[in-house]
Amino acid sequence: MSGPILRWPGAARRRYMLVLTVAVSAAAWPAAAQDRIDPEANRILAAMSDNLKSMPTLRVDFDADQEVLSLQGQKIQYSASGSIVLDRAKGFRMKRMGPFGEAEVIFDGKTISLHDKVGNAYAQLQSPGRGVEDATEELRAVTGLDAPGAELLASDPYAVLSDGVTDGAVVGTAFVNGVECDHLAFRADLVDWQIWISKGSKPLPLKYVITTKWVTGAPQYSLRLSNWKSDGLEAAQFKFTPPADAAKLEHVHADVTGELSLEADQ
């Protein structure tokens, strides 16, 4: 008998999950593509990555829009809001409110807990390591779920973002939530993606759009990031204690839209 359902956003792309990365420089771009990567676009992307890497703890709010094509070819856009709190040494907590309910994913350095607040249900996975990359990769491996935007929280965002890029350019200057940004556009074999990075000595990503080229209709995933903070975080928020009457579910999988379904044992 099926139990409560926990839903979480995703997208049809594999390479943008967090992966174990190594330090890289501008030479990370494929040799054949280096003449198609604007050096200024590369510099801005690398500077943003360096700033994110320098933050051992961070908190950010997000608004996400995901396009899904119906069988009739109509695009339907699903919207959600939430927040992410990250301590690179201790874990993370991601909260999301969307059309299918309110849920959390919590990692305490050992266990990944998925909590459906509306259905009062939870499931837990063991991570193979203490790193954030270990936890997110385990989540992907077990459930099939990809998390667009997670690469921005990697230990080296530049290494993940630049992987497979064939073209890159500075589109120009733009404003996101009233903040002046550099607007960059990049291309890869399966996806095109754009990123808006705040200008200044501590550049941050404020908007991120991924277009999946190999799917009919080229659906997009859009992410807006705001209220970045790098201090004042408490380690206690990475601990998860199930409510006394919560149902513990065993089976976790993601459907074609990226939604996570949790089901009780038969």
Image: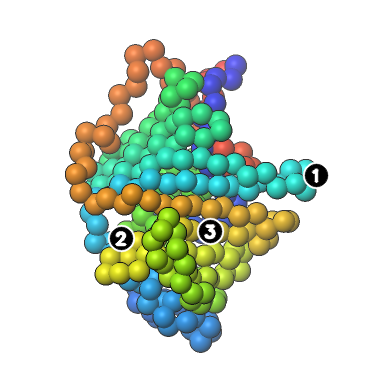
Q: Is residue 229 above or below residue 52?
A: above
Q: Nearer the viewer, residue 79 or 219?
A: 79
Position of residue 217 measured from the top left corner of the image (x, y, whole percent): 72, 56
Q: Nearer the viewer, residue 162 or 217?
A: 217
Residue 123 appears in the picture as rendered: no
Q: Identify the disc placed on residue 186.
A: none
Q: How busy is the neighbourhood of tag 1: few (under 14 within 10 Å), some, or many (20 plus)?
A: few
Q: Identify the disc placed on residue 209.
A: 3
Q: In the picture, which quadrant includes the C terminus? A: top right
Q: Secondary structure at mark 2?
A: helix
Q: Using the numbered discs, state the Cα–Cα distance from disc 3 to disc 1 in whole angstroms.
A: 24 Å
> Which of the 4 image quadrants contains residue 90?
top left
Residue positioned 75% across, 46% down in the render: 74
Q: Secondary structure at mark 1?
A: loop
> Which of the 4 image quadrants contains residue 199?
bottom left
Contact, mark 2 vs mark 3 (Cβ under 8 Å): no
Residue positioned 19% across, 44% down in the render: 232
Q: Amino acid at mark 3?
A: Val
Residue positioned 35% across, 36% down in the render: 106
Q: Which residue is mark 2?
A: 52
Left or right of residue 232: residue 199: right
Contact, mark 2 vs mark 1 (Cβ under 8 Å): no
Q: Amino acid at mark 1?
A: Gln
> Which of the 4 image quadrants contains residue 160?
bottom left
Q: Using the numbered discs, state the Cα–Cα distance from disc 2 to disc 3 in whole angstroms.
A: 19 Å
Q: Is residue 221 above or below residue 183?
A: above
Q: Identify the disc placed on residue 72.
A: 1
Q: How busy is the neighbourhood of tag 2: few (under 14 within 10 Å), some, or many (20 plus)?
A: many
Q: Amino acid at mark 2?
A: Leu
Which of pointers 3 and 1 lies earlier in the amino acid sequence? 1
Q: Is residue 140 above or below residue 18?
A: above
Q: In the picture, which quadrant includes the N terminus? A: top right
